[in-house]
Amino acid sequence: MITFNYETDFALADEDRYASWISGVISSEGKSEGDINYVFCDDDYLYKINMEYLRHDDLTDIISFDYSVGNELHGDIFISVERVRENADDFKVLFDEELRRVMAHGVLHYAGYKDKSDADSELMRLKEEEKMKMFHVKQ
C-alpha cells in the first residue's frame, strides 16, 4: 500500500493518481508492492533525520529507508519539498516533474538501483526518466 504523509503545508493534488503510478513503477520492475510511506517535509525536518540516522551534515532532497523483503518492496521515503522546489529551479524543470523524479528515485533504490558510481548514476537517471513517463499513462 502506498501512503502519503505531510509534515509541511504541501499536499499532492491527486494522491490516488500518484499511488497508482508508483504501483505501476513497482510492478514494471517485476517487484511486489508492500508498504511504501512517503513523508513530505521541509529542509529542517529532513536535515534532522539526515544527522540523526546517517550522520550527514548537509541538506538533501530525499532519504529512503528500505525495509524490503525479497521482491516485496517496503520502506519510508522522506522528501524535502523545499529542496525539490530549489532543485527544479536549478535544473530549469517544473516542480511537478522534479517531484516525480525524486518519488521514482526512492522506489528505484528499493528495486535495487544504486547511484554511488557514475555508471550506476547514469542507469538510475535512465530509469527515472522511464518511470516518469509512466505517470502520463493510464494505469
Image (tube, helix red, strand yellow):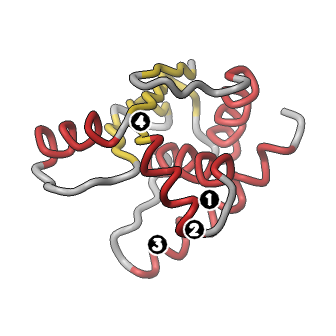
Q: Which quarter of the image is occupied by the N terminus?
A: top right
Query: Crowding near pointer 1: few (<14 within 10 Å), some, many (20+)?
Result: many
Q: Tell whether label 1 touches label 3 (CB within 8 Å).
A: no
Of mark 4 and mark 3, the one earlier in the sequence is 4
Q: Tell whether label 2 touches label 1 (CB within 8 Å).
A: yes
Q: Amino acid at mark 1?
A: Glu
Of mark 4 and mark 2, the one earlier in the sequence is 4
Relative to 76, say whether 59 is above or below.
Answer: below
Residue bearing the label numbered 3 = 121
Quarter location, residue 11 = top right
Of mark 4 and mark 1, the one earlier in the sequence is 4
Q: Tell whether label 2 touches label 4 (CB within 8 Å).
A: no
Front position in the image: 2 or 84: 84
* Alpha carbon separation for disc pair 4 and 2: 18 Å
| Side of 21 relative to 65 (left or right) | right
SS for callout 3:
helix
| Side of 65 relative to 24 (left or right) | left
Residue 128: which numbered mark, if any? Answer: 1
* Alpha carbon separation for disc pair 1 and 2: 5 Å
| Side of 82 relative to 95 (left or right) | left
Q: Residue at x 43, y 25 (%)?
A: 8
SS for callout 4:
strand
* Alpha carbon separation for disc pair 3 and 2: 6 Å
Q: Residue at x 67, y 22 (%)?
A: 15
Q: Tell whether label 1 touches label 4 (CB within 8 Å).
A: no
SS for callout 1:
helix
Q: Which quarter of the image is occupied by the C terminus?
A: top right
Residue bearing the label numbered 2 = 125
Residue bearing the label numbered 4 = 77
